[in-house]
Structures are given as structure tokens and as C-alpha cells.
């Protein structure tokens, strides 16, 4: 009788079953992470537009502070004017109806995921 070393068929089948279970658990989590990452990127762009608008408004309120004129501009034009480097590629802006004079709520749309987020641009008039 030979003394051969190796894996038995049961051991190999158990490894294949365990790999299948791990794959079944890991793949849905990976797909969900992609969706969450796209939404986080979209929220980041919307937040940066709102933050840049607030800084621009504050600069306009300080004597000699300047600030870029955004009143009467479209959402895209205003965001491009106040963001360094403009609107990132893969995002578009559209305006919601004007609710308060000088304040526009813009909808930021991500072309890759199709998701949307809102951003507020405060109108600044040249002093």
C-alpha cells in the first residue's frame, strides 16, 4: 500500500463551498460600496459649491474684500466663477425656481450615477 499525500475530495469540495459563500457575501457589499462612493462624491461637490458660495458672500460683505459677482448668473456660471478649477467633470448644475431674492438652489447631477444633490448659491452683487 502506497502512502500518498494530498487533499481528499471532501477537503477540496469544502474549500470550494467556502469560497462560494465568501463570494456570495462579498460581491453585494462591493456593489453597495460603489453606490455609496458615487453618492459621497456627489455630496462633496454639492458641499464645495455651497461652501465656496458662503466664502464668496462673506468676502463681498467685508469692505475691500472683493467677492465674485454671481447675481443674475446661471447656476453653472456662478459655480464656475466661485470654484477654483470650475465644476468637476461629470457633474451638471440646474437651477430650481428662485425662492428668495439673491439665493438660488441648484441641483447638482452626477452623469455617471444619475443621482442628484442640492446646493445653495448666494447671489453677490458687485459693490
Image (cartoon, rainbow, N blue to C red):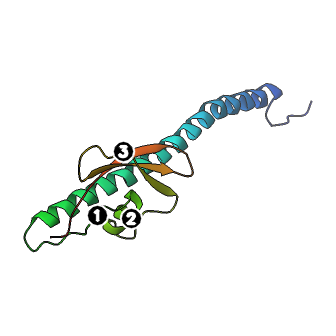
Instruction: Indicate which disc, 1 or 3, sits on the residue closer to the N terminus.
Output: 1
Q: Which quadrant does the C terminus fall into?
A: bottom left
- Secondary structure under tag 3 reads loop
Of circles 1 and 3, the one toward us is 3
Marks 2 and 1, how far apart in space? 8 Å
Would you say the residues marked 2 and 1 are in contact, meaning their CB atoms lie under 8 Å apart?
Answer: yes
Q: Residues within 10 Å of mark 1 (few under 14, many from 20)?
A: many
Marks 3 and 2, how far apart in space? 16 Å
Residue beneath the point at 70% across and 31% down:
20
Of circles 3 and 2, the one toward us is 3
Residue beneath the point at 19% across and 60% down:
57
Marks 1 and 3, how far apart in space? 16 Å
Q: Circle 2 sits on which residue? A: 77
Q: Residues within 10 Å of mark 3 (few under 14, many from 20)?
A: few
Q: Which mark is residue 97?
A: 3
Residue 30 in the figure: left or right of residue 98: right
3 above or below 119? above
77 above or below 116? below
Q: Nearer the viewer, residue 70 or 51?
A: 70
- Secondary structure under tag 1 reads loop
- Secondary structure under tag 2 reads helix
Q: Quadrant of residue 1?
A: top right
Q: Nearer the viewer, residue 119 or 123?
A: 123
Q: Circle 1 sits on which residue? A: 70
Residue beneath the point at 21% across and 65% down:
125
Outermost residue toward the bottom in this view: 64
Q: Residues within 10 Å of mark 2 (few under 14, many from 20)?
A: some
Would you say the residues marked 1 and 3 are in contact, meaning their CB atoms lie under 8 Å apart?
Answer: no
Q: Quadrant of residue 54?
A: bottom left
Residue 71 in the figure: left or right of residue 12: left
Q: Quadrant of residue 30?
A: top right
Residue beneath the point at 72% across and 31% down:
15
Amino acid at each position: 500500500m502506497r502512502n500518498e499525500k494530498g487533499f481528499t475530495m471532501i477537503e477540496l469540495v469544502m474549500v470550494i463551498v467556502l469560497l462560494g459563500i465568501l463570494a456570495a457575501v462579498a460581491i453585494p457589499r462591493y456593489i453597495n460600496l460603489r453606490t455609496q462612493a458615487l453618492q459621497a462624491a456627489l455630496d462633496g461637490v454639492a458641499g464645495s459649491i455651497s461652501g465656496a458660495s458662503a466664502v464668496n458672500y462673506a468676502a463681498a460683505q467685508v469692505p475691500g474684500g472683493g467677492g465674485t459677482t454671481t447675481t443674475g448668473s446661471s447656476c453653472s456660471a456662478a459655480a464656475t466663477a466661485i470654484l477654483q478649477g470650475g465644476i468637476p467633470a461629470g457633474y451638471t448644475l440646474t437651477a430650481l425656481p428662485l425662492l428668495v431674492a439673491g439665493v438660488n438652489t441648484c441641483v447638482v447631477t452626477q452623469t455617471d450615477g444619475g443621482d442628484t444633490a442640492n446646493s445653495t448659491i448666494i447671489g453677490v452683487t458687485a459693490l
